[in-house]
Amino acid sequence: MHIKSSFFCLFIAILATACSHSPVLCLLPADAELKEGDVVFRRGGGLTSHAVLVADRKGQYSHVGIVVDSCGTLLVVHAVPGEPDFEGDPDRVKADRPEHFFSSEYTSIGEVCRPRDEHAAAVAAQAAWQAYQRHTLFDHDYDDSDTTKMYCTELVAYAYRHAGIDLVEDRGGHYINLPFLQGECVYPSDIYQSDFLTSVIKF
């Protein structure tokens, strides 16, 4: 009887959490200064995020993007599923404001990492921006050999390869076999471990 009561209380607590409507906040600190080419990481609370974290045993983040400068406005370019801007919006490479990328709707913790070379950062950011402008779709097959579609880590690694930088090196090539997530891919931790990047803020 005690065990049943405990499970019932747990169920009520989960239900109450799910039904509560917390305000959407930006978790990126107000004094954080982003720069073009910054590689930004976040951990989400959705099903796909949990799947990535289960698979990526070395990682603490489930998603990654790159900061670009669009006519003086800093945006985060990232390839993401399940975040449509409008009804019928396909999974694709997006360009979101940092406060949206790091909103509490999608983020529980985050980090900004800065490349060592500003020129390489600018070249990589431009490559990512071009992928966005091409309306590149999200790669649900996680196929690194096909850049007509991209998933999040593939996009960031691809952008920096344009600048002559290999963020992944000999890491990567992990095979995921989950009901809704299958393929050989690069994990966020494979990019996070790059010596070319330095953490500038965690939150």
Image: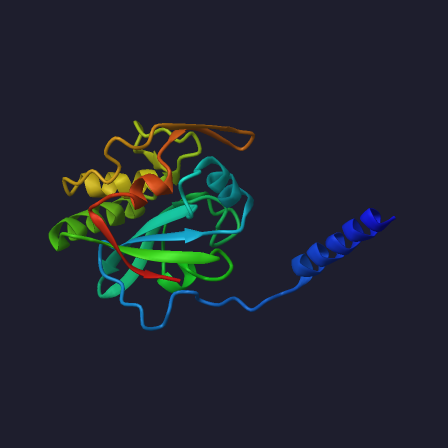
The extreme front residue here reads: 2
Left or right of 162 in this view: 58: right
Q: Residue at x 48, y 50 (%)?
A: 83
- Pick whichever, 11 or 25, lies toward us: 11
- Pick whichever, 169 or 2, lies toward us: 2
The extreme left residue here reads: 119
From where the camera sits, is residue 93 visible? no
Residue 136 higher or lower than 86, as above or below: above
Colouring method of the image: rainbow
Q: Residue at x 21, y 45 (%)?
A: 195
Residue 115 image offset from top left, x and y in percent: 20, 52
Left or right of 186 in this view: 12: right
Residue 114 image offset from top left, x and y in percent: 23, 55
Residue 57 image offset from top left, x and y in percent: 44, 38
**Quadrant position of the C terminus in the picture:** bottom left
Q: Residue at x 46, y 62 (%)?
A: 103
Left or right of 117 in this view: 178: right
The extreme right residue here reads: 1
